[in-house]
Amino acid sequence: MLRLLIFLLALLAAHPAAAQLRAPGPPNITPQLVVDGPIQPGSEVDLAILMTTKPGWHGYWLNPGDAGQPMRIEWRLPPGAAIGPLRYPVPERLTIAGLMNYVYNGPYAILTRLKVPVDARGILPVRASAQWLACTDQICVPEQGELTLDVPVGGGADESARFDGWRQKLPRPLGSPSRFQVEGDQLRLAIPLPRSVPLGEPYLFPTTEGAIDHAAPQRFSRSGDTLVAELKLLGTKPQAFAGVLAMGDGRGLELRAEPGPVPSGGTSIGTGEGRAVLLAVLGALAGGLLLNFMPCVFPILALKALALARAGGEERTARRDALAYTAGAVAGTGVLGLALLAVRAGGSAAGWAFQLQDPRTVLLLTLLATAITLNLLGLFKLPVIGGEASPRSGFATGALAAFVATPCAGPFMGAALGAALLLPAAGAILVFAALGLGLALPFLALAFVPALRRRLPRPGPWMARLQQVLAIPMALTVAACLWLLWRRGGEPALLMALVAVTLLALLLIGYGRLQQRGPALGAAALLGSLAIGGTAAAALPASTAATRPLTGAEPWSERRVAAALASGRPAFVYFTADWCLTCKVNEAGAIDRDSVRDAFRKADVEVLAGDWTDGDPAITRFLESRGRAGVPLYLWYRPGSAEPEELPQVLTTGMLVARASRSSTPANAGAQPSRFSAR
């Protein structure tokens, strides 16, 4: 307390001099109002106070810590308009002279909600008087200013991309209540947090002022699905406690606690964190292993097995090829993971297979699958893929398998990649690399286990026939990619893709005939293929097709789920994407079946579908809140239940019918029929 008084006295003494000495010009922290337009009469929109700091200066959180002060603002709005509470992003810690400060060292955005009057027309003027404190490590300058924004009703710029980045930095409300108790000079806090959720370097920022010693060390441990924080009490026991749990990498959870029992013992957070990483790595290994059974990956694995059989099972060659294949698969998934982390660091809401939301990437995948299909049919030979066993061939094939596997998901994979996005960067890359290792495990087993290698059939004419059979699933992959392009870009995109596929097929068939006659022009064929792909991608029309509501289901929103539960109806929610093979298999084989439709109709089940084909940010945020990095995700909501049941990623009709049957009660027997209907 003495240090705080000294600091405040120094600030009061320095303020007049600082104000007199500061040269006229812009403030050290410049505020700006930004609205997430366009806005409509009677609606509510997000409004941001964007605080841009000069290098070396910082602003303060709503609880500034041992020193400083938060922003104070007085709004002036037209009649009928209203402003909600300020929502601050997760702050940083700054210790100066033993004082703990909660600050922002770079630009930051404080969000609130603006309620637009029902009769608003023309321009909606938003005015405010604001005061804030700008500090360096040596001096603090109180600043103030007038904030103005003229919002055009029915118009305005679309700022959704910037707001998505700002929203990601806000702490998310913790759904379950926390508890605390006081033991001596310690305030012990029990925070409900599943043990599967990894933590970087946790820290609890208190919003209840004067409750704890900000500068004192904080200790964390896990006791089952409870995170226990031990904080040094300051003064008397509070009646309630609230704060923000920072989880690392700028993420945070907003919590409120009431007096109650707190478990003792537990595992130190350091030990528990290692266990969480281990579980995520094991899940990625299992998920990568199962990817080998997907139709777009299995032919590639089979090609490598055929190449190994042709080599006669020679041990040294097989192991070198397998290690190179593994390196390619690990490098492929690692690079995709790095790209995903970079996109998310830039403020975009993205998840696994995010690159398939770009039609140009889908077009390149279409051409690649076309080339592999022609290779399997024997119309040309590509030695790098499926040719003689060699490190170069192995690495290229492993990287290819990693790329073509991105539309697929399976058991273990979704939860593992969701956990990876919550880990620090090093842990996340480790999980993505483990996915590639799992993808390579079958070929590693063939190469390093002589008993398995001896079971490979002898080379013979059957190999050519098997390759032609394997061309069928790869050709189906081409058809699926063409359908996806039509969904995203309409007929112009489909026509462009068909032209590119035809030109590439003619080029590679001609190249195959040259290979049969003698020396082939491999470099020329490669350059021609790249020219076709690059030209088609550049000329591809922009994605203009709007997200189409899925047949038999209403578009998902959290509000629709809440409305169904409030009316006593169960709800089945599934998140899908056009490029997600697993999603489409489940929809065709389990969801869109007569028995399921009948059961849903009898139980009056509300069926809601979230289409993530274009990477809808709202769906991305919801997936992240469930610890998922991608689709599919299936949830069953029961009226009166606090949490939905998360269903497996491989569905069956019996699984859905059974849940609908249990929901058929006299209370809803006379309700309106479900809107889920046949195609």
Image (cartoon, rainbow, N blue to C red):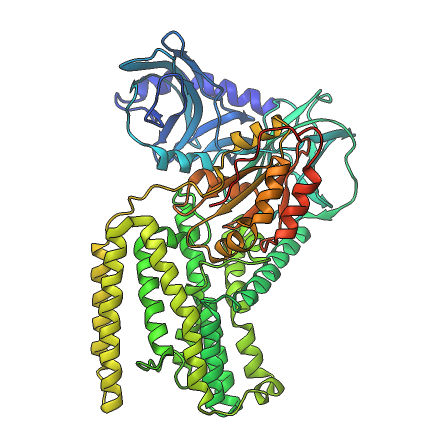
Q: In front here: 654 or 382?
A: 654
Is 245 above or below relative to 259? below
Q: Please give the name of the residue rendered at 63% of the width and 26% of the height, measured from the top-left corner.
A: 242
Instruction: Evaluate whether residue 155 shows in this view.
Output: yes
Q: In front here: 23 or 567?
A: 567
Query: Residue 47: which quarter of the image?
Result: top left
Q: Where is residue 41 drawn, in percent x and y?
A: 36, 17
Q: In front here: 579 or 572?
A: 572
Question: Would you say 292 lies left or right of 273 here?
Answer: left
Is 213 above or below relative to 495? above
Query: Residue 46: which quarter of the image?
Result: top left
Question: Would you say 309 lies left or right of 565 here?
Answer: left
Quadrant of the image for the N terminus?
top right
Q: Where is residue 312 drawn, in percent x and y?
A: 49, 92
Query: Residue 396: which quarter of the image?
Result: bottom left
Instruction: Evaluate whether residue 140 shows in this view.
Output: no
Q: Residue furthest top?
A: 79
Question: Would you say 337 lies left or right of 261 here?
Answer: left
Q: Where is residue 596 drawn, in percent x and y?
A: 59, 47
Question: Would you say 139 lies left or right of 180 here?
Answer: left
Q: Please give the name of the residue rendered at 28% of the width and 29% of the height, measured from the top-left corner.
A: 157
Q: Please give the name of the residue rendered at 25% of the width and 78% of the height, measured from the top-left corner.
A: 509
Q: Where is residue 497 drawn, in percent x and y?
A: 27, 60
